[in-house]
Image: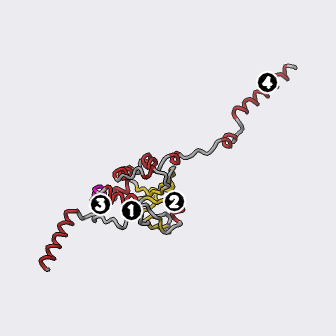
């Protein structure tokens, strides 16, 4: 074998070795599998806790003893009010909810959960969506955005291992939960009721 032929063989061998290590363009894409989004390995409760925009909702779930519910098998569709949504609740109403964690707070939170997995498209295809609380929520998909009981879905289809989350811009109150108006307090209501009772007794 002459010197020129020897050099040619070495060059071809090196080229084959380099191609084998690096692979052809596009081969890596074909061999790789699609990675599962992180949220799909976490429960709904874990996704909410890690997100950072639902801290009030997460604390409310814990206060009402419902944190474990969203760790179950589900699946659940959760309409999660953002922290900004909770900030819009009047102080008197928020105080009422906090003062009754196992009662009206729990009822309100369960009203934000639907049994089953509803994507935003699936929600928009229905007039109502059932809830774990029992009362259905009304859906309006006539405009550019989807609303549930007037609350707009601002982030949709957040995946979780046991369901899906939709962020909403308002807290939904179940129809059977009556909260005090913003300008009323428990003391005012009690005084008003007492005045009514006295008037009825006098006129009666």
Tell which of 40 and 182 is nearer to you.
40
Cα distance in 3D space between marks 3 and 4: 82 Å
Identify the mark nearer the N-term, 2 or 4: 4
Report which residue position mark 1 lands on: 172
Identify the mark nearer the N-term, 2 or 1: 2
- Is residue 98 covered in magenta? yes
Report which residue position mark 4 lands on: 10
Give the quadrant of the N terminus.
top right
Locate residue 6 relative to residue 163 in the image: left or right.
Answer: right
Locate residue 148 relative to residue 193 in the image: left or right.
Answer: right
Closer to the eye: label 2 or 3: 2
Report which residue position mark 2 lands on: 118
Q: Where does residue 100 sit, x and y in percent of width and height?
A: 29, 57
Q: Which residue is located at x 16 percent, y 77 percent?
A: 200
Which region shows up in magenta?
Answer: 94-99
Closer to the eye: label 2 or 4: 2
Cα distance in 3D space between marks 2 and 4: 62 Å
- Is residue 168 covered in magenta? no
Report which residue position mark 3 lands on: 93
Disc 1 packing (10 Å; few <14; some 14–19; many ≥20): many
Q: Is the C-beta separation of discs 4 and 1 under 8 Å?
A: no
Closer to the eye: label 3 or 4: 3
- Which residue, as the protein is rendered here, is positioned at the far bottom? 204
């Amino acid at each position: 074998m002459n010197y020129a032929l020897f050099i040619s063989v070495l060059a071809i061998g090196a080229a084959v070795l380099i191609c084998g290590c690096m692979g052809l363009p596009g081969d890596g894409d074909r061999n790789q599998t699609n990675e599962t989004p992180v949220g799909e390995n976490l429960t709904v409760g874990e996704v909410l806790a890690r997100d950072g925009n639902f801290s009030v909702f997460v604390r409310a779930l814990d206060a009402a003893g419902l944190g474990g519910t969203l760790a179950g098998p589900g699946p659940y569709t959760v309409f999660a009010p953002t922290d900004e949504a909770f900030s819009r609740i009047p102080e008197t109403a928020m105080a009422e909810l906090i003062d009754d964690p196992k009662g009206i707070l729990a009822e309100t939170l369960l009203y934000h959960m639907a049994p089953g997995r509803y994507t935003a498209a699936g929600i928009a295809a229905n007039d109502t969506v059932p809830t774990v609380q029992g009362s259905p929520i009304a859906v309006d998909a006539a405009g550019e955005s989807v609303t549930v009981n007037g609350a707009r879905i601002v982030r949709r289809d957040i995946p979780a291992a046991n369901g899906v989350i939709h962020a909403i811009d308002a807290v939904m109150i179940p129809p059977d939960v009556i909260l005090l108006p913003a300008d009323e307090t428990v003391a005012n209501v009690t005084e008003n009721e007492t005045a009514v009772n006295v008037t009825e007794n006098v006129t009666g």
